[in-house]
Image: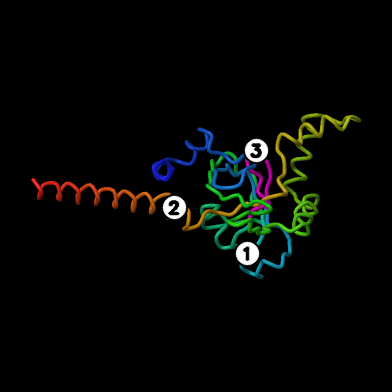
Amino acid sequence: MFIVASINSFRSLETLYKEGDDFSGDSGYSIIKVVAIEEQNIVDEKLKEGEKNFYLVDYERGFIMLKSYRKRIRKKFLDGRKLQDGKLTNLSSENIYKRIDAIPEVTYGRRSSRKVNITPELRRKFVDSLPKSSLIKDRVKQIINEVGVKDNKDAYTSKLKEKPFYSDMYLKPIGWGYYVMTIGVPFVLSAITIGVIFFNKKKNSSCS
């Protein structure tokens, strides 16, 4: 697994994305194609003012919150692009592919340990922020233009499900831990393997 991840780390994110390494609602590492992003006014006790914030991300296949440092958003997630009035839209043609870490509502560890990443209160804040978001308003307008004005709500519901919003998890840009796991660990294991082979070969030569 480590070797495959290490090899993939040298391939383009766009290629890996098109081969199926895309975010589909599961926790862990995957890739998204960014369409738009908008800063949200969400207050959480775990957020330190001026350091981290939540952003609503419109990616090719849905909507989800992103938690990150403000400076890191511009440098690492948007490749130097600045938010304009707290958002950036119409990015689909710019082919911005990003590897992310999807954090679930609850993480289970050893010995049945349990860490709550998203409290019920925070999840409500995620949902309550949607009607205020210009990204969601644009999505609703798009659906109305495609479907038309109808009394039957099923047509709208079906269209909304094509790009769902995930309230039970959020994204984080990958950090140094990912690169240690995908590059550093395989390198160390390879070095140890080569060392053992060399030692055994030298030992056998001295015995003969």
Mark 2 residue element: helix
Circle 3 Cα neighbour tier, 10 Å, few/some/many (<14 / 14–19 / ≥20)? some
Report the residue that reaches farthest toward the front: 207
What residue lies at 57% left-to-right and 43% top-to-bottom?
32
Depicted 45 relative to depicted 32: above or below: below
Left or right: where 176 falls relative to 202:
right
What residue lies at 61% left-to-right and 67% top-to-bottom?
51
Q: Amino acid at mark 3?
A: Arg
| Position of residue 82 measured from the top left corner of the image (x, y, whole percent) | 58, 57
Mark 3 residue element: loop
| Residue under label 3 | 61
What residue lies at 78% left-to-right and 31% top-to-bottom?
158
Label annotation for residue 52: 1
Depicted 35 relative to depicted 191: above or below: above
| Dot in front, 1 or 2 | 2
- Mark found first going from the N terminus, 1 or 2: 1
| Dot in front, 2 or 3 | 2
> Magenta residues, as a range?
56-66
